[in-house]
Amino acid sequence: MPSFERESNRIVIAGASSLLGAELKSLLEESRFAGWDLRLVDEEIAAGTLTEAGGEPAVIQPVEEGSFDRARLVFFTGSPEFTKVNLGAVQGATVIDPVSEAGRRGIEELESQTSQLLSMQSTGQSVFDTQVAFGMLNRYGAASRENLLSISRRICAEVSPLVAKWGGLASIQVVHAPIFYGYTFAALVETAALTTQPKLVQLCQNAGFYIWRNADGPLGNLSVGDSTMHLELPEESPLLAWWSWGAVDNIKLPVANAVKLAEKLAA
């Protein structure tokens, strides 16, 4: 990174109108980056949106020549297509890929489908090309831009190197559930030798999980309102294996990780 960029205090959020972009902006304003020069850019359709930054009114700008100039940090929080188009304009910046979600359009479609079905009306399907309300799905419609198989392959590619350090293999399947926020997951861990629940709990805590106990009540996506990974106490199953159930906020966790990484790089 050129010296002038290392000395810059400019941050660009590319995809600022997204749910992830809004959460990231709020967290940056509460971090050591409060007071930095925060620039908000997005696709043409979102350009001109009035918001605020640093307690002052701000307008989301379109990406133009010079939008990323002198940026110390750049966060991409928009669609994958938007990120691919503009990634080449960034030199020496920190890039955070958005979570695999459909954004506000997806939320609005689930909300409208729920209301329409309860009113015995036909449902709109412009985002997912299928009914996503009141049902579980292993894939979306053929015309949908959202692809559960691609999501599972991406997650598997990200998890596999970490699991490989322990001599294991990762197998991931993603299923749609009619919820607005948060990921939940079930995990099976096979061990080469007998182990105990306390040992596994300690390993999980060392990895950054919050261990959810019976006194905390049922664990689900609505139980999570922070950037912590929540995991229920592992339960022993036959053949040297342990099951556990987990939940995480799909907006707050990647944003918190992005800010932590940025703080280390900017130190």
Image (cartoon, grey):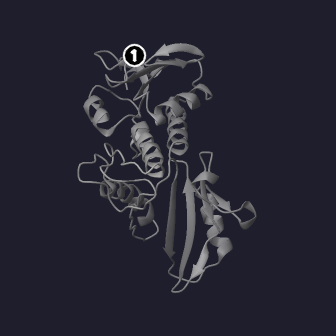
Residue at the outermost right position? 215
Instruction: Give whichever of 99, 190 is nearer the camera.
Output: 99
Task: Using the rendered image of the protein, determine whether residue 94 is visible from the camera's viewpoint.
Answer: yes
Q: Residue 7: percent from the left, percent from the top?
A: 47, 18
Report the residue marked by disc 1. Answer: 48
Residue 185 pos. (x, y %):
50, 62
Residue 251 in picture, x, y percent from top left: 51, 42
Front residue of this view, candidates 176 and 58:
176
Compare residues 155 and 102 and report the one nearer the observer: 102
Question: Are there few (<14), some (14-19), or many (20+) residues within 10 Å of tag 1?
Answer: some
The quadrant of the picture occupied by the C terminus is top right
The quarter in which the N terminus is drawn is: top left
Locate residue 54: give its quadrant: top right
Number of marks in picture: 1
- What residue appears at the point 30 percent right and 32 percent down from the top-left corner? 82
* Residue 240 or residue 129, whichever sits in front: 129
In this image, 97 relative to 111: left or right? left
Q: In this orientation, does residue 96 appear?
A: no
Q: Secondary structure at mark 1?
A: loop
| Three-letter amino acid code at the position of disc 1 | Gly
- Residue 26 place in picture, x, y as percent: 57, 29
In-image side of 130 versus 71 (left or right) = left
As displayed, is residue 42 above or below residue 264? above
Q: Is residue 202 above or below residue 72?
A: below
Residue that extends furthest to the top in the rendered view of this protein: 57
- Farthest residue toward the bottom? 239
